[in-house]
Amino acid sequence: MFSRRRSVGLVAAVSIVVAALGATVATAQQDDAPPEGTGDAALLARLDALEPQLPSELAPSSVDLDPDASWGSFEGDVTGAAATLGTLERDLLSLFVDADDAGTEVADAVADVARGWLDLQQAYEQLAVWEAADLAFPIDASDSASIATDADELAGRAEAGLRIVLGASQRQLAGYVALRALGEADPGAQERFDGRAAAAEAFDQDIRPLIAQLLAVRTTQVMVPVERFETSAPGVEARARSMTVTCIDRQTYLEATTTTPVEGLENVDITDPAAVLGLLDPSGERADCPGLAEEQDVRVRD
């Protein structure tokens, strides 16, 4: 069952005020003649001009899974974020189109970031509709015969919104991390982009795996054996009861072990986990693979 939780108490009146305030701020800043141009420096300046107006963090900001159900609850101001991004949609779309056409490394990164924010706007609009749905009856209600009388909670809206969040956060991660690596923005802007990159990495590590689990989609990580059938007590302990595993990014591993030759892996025996893992670094501890950032022994007991 879907469950609503908010980091702040939102009501319709507050949402209207937030939307109106966002529109006022956006109008005032448009009057200040925002940067223009399609060169790398201009694109970076245009993105940086939008940074103070963009949501300070991605929603959901936290996710709680229900161990007894296939759902849970999450926190985040999706209504306010949808209103804010709605006022910036025109500027973000223009920035995305110009950056996507420019064809440089910087432009590609800016395009990823702008596209990510545009996708998040769609996601938050879906989640805002779900959150504001008027329920005619209490959730989990039933009559004297134990027949459900509760209302539909627009579960499809919530699922659609969260699925878009998964893709959008990946685009933002790629874009902001690339901008950090390129380091071509002015010092102040570069510091802000670096902060966004760190926040995107934290979201990818702590929140995105939980959203995936909430939606019952594939985990972001996979445990892969490094050594199998090893034992510290030969002749005493069965070798088949132990192995060493590590946890790596699922998509990276799938790409590395595909039957289609991958650059850098042409001479690697993809049937040998150790050979493949030698080229892949553990992706760090994520919410769906805690404690397995490094190799770890696993033993099977009777």
Image (cartoon, grey):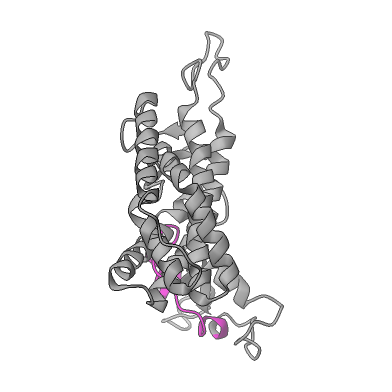
Residue 293: percent from left, percent from top: 40, 70
Residue 139: percent from left, percent from top: 48, 22
Residue beneath the point at 54% across and 60% down? 96
Q: Quadrant of residue 157?
A: top right
The residue lying toward the viewer, choosing from 267 and 12, is 12
Residue 26: percent from left, percent from top: 38, 45
Instruction: Let me know if residue 288 appears in the view.
Output: yes
Q: Is residue 264 above or below residue 89?
A: below
Q: Quadrant of residue 82?
A: top left
Residue 34 located left or right of residue 144 = left
Residue beneath the point at 42% across and 36% down? 79
Residue 138: percent from left, percent from top: 46, 18
The residue lying toward the viewer, choosing from 224 and 251, is 251
Q: Is residue 96 above or below residue 216?
A: below
Q: Is residue 149 above or below residue 223?
A: above
The residue lying toward the viewer, choosing from 294 and 129, is 129
Residue 15 located left or right of residue 255 = left
Asked if residue 1 is among those painted magenta in the image, a careful observer would answer no
Residue beneath the point at 51% across and 15% down? 136
The magenta region covers: 275-298
